[in-house]
Amino acid sequence: MKTKYTKVATLAFALITFESLTGEANAATHLVDFSQFAVPGGNWNSLTSTQNTNFPLIDSTGSNLGVTLTHNLSSDSNITGGWTAGDVDWVATAAASDGFYSGTSAMITFAGLGIGNYSIRLVSAEDGDSGGGAFTSTSDIQVAGVFADSNRLGTSANGDDWNTKTDGVNNWLQWDGVASSGGEISISIDASSSGFTTINAIEITRTSVPEPTSSLLLCLGGLGFISLRRRRS
């Protein structure tokens, strides 16, 4: 027969193992390609504008970890001349050369994220001269209400009045150390000097995973309490 002591010990091991495995599983990268005019190879999530509510995402290894994406951008755009830097780092030309656009305000929300901090890189590029319904837009782009920490080219651009042509055609915005709130991270795009918002591609990567110290301390405390009661009895 299992004693209370061994039951708590078993529970402690199970909790610690679960948190460790969950942390490892969610320490992943998700790549999102907005629009299917051009579809990149590899494990990109290429969306249509109608795939907009709790769309299940695979990570860069092809695994489904329960992460979903919801957005309210309404239209696809074939921005054939929007991105000029080619395949560089995480960006695939096919992902950055088309995108979604919408009205004066757009929201993109990742849900089902694990506890921890994330790095987010985002392309919003459109030159307005390429045809295919393309147009230049200027927007304020924020993650969790904050402008970007840096960008690919090391300029001062941080998403405040981000112009898809002068800022975006060969550049991306980057946020570091973004904490998920209730398993969610939201990106807002609000048109400033234009009436449209634009998004081409996003990379979101979990960069830090908390150690399972909370479960460990809780269970060790329970073990100590039971041990003390056993000695006194």
Image (tube, rainbow, N blue to C red):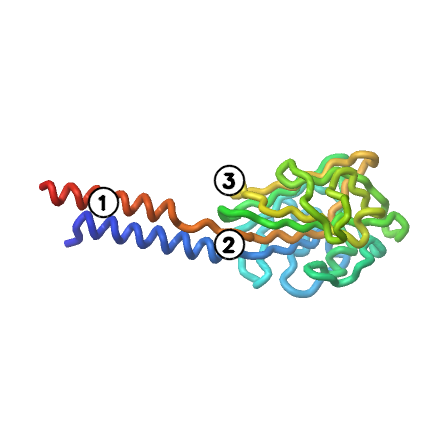
Q: Which residue is painted at 25% across and 52% down in the image?
A: 9
- Describe the element under mark 3 as helix, strand or loop: loop
Mark 2 or mark 1, which is nearer the start of the sequence? Answer: 2
Q: Amino acid at mark 1?
A: Gly
**How many numbered dots are placed on residues in this image?**
3
Closest to the observer, 151 or 202: 151
Quadrant of residue 158 within the rendered picture? top right
Q: Around disc 1, counting alpha carbons within 10 Å, would you say few (fewer than 14), some (14 to 19), or many (20 or more)?
A: few
25 left or right of 97?
left
Q: Which residue is painted at 62% across and 47% down in the image?
A: 176
Closest to the observer, 191 or 131: 191
Q: Residue furthest bottom?
A: 41
Q: Amino acid at mark 2?
A: Asn
- Describe the element under mark 2 as helix, strand or loop: helix
| Residue that carries the numbered disc 1 in the rendered image | 224
Name above or below for residue 82 compared with residue 102. below
Q: Amino acid at mark 3?
A: Gly
Q: Which residue is painted at 64% across and 36% down in the image?
A: 145
Residue 26, label in figure: 2
- In the rendered view of the protein, which quadrant contains the N terminus? bottom left
Residues at badges 3 and 2 in contact (C-beta under 8 Å)?
no
Q: Position of residue 126 (x, y in %)?
A: 82, 49
209 left or right of 36?
left
| Residue that carries the numbered disc 3 in the rendered image | 182
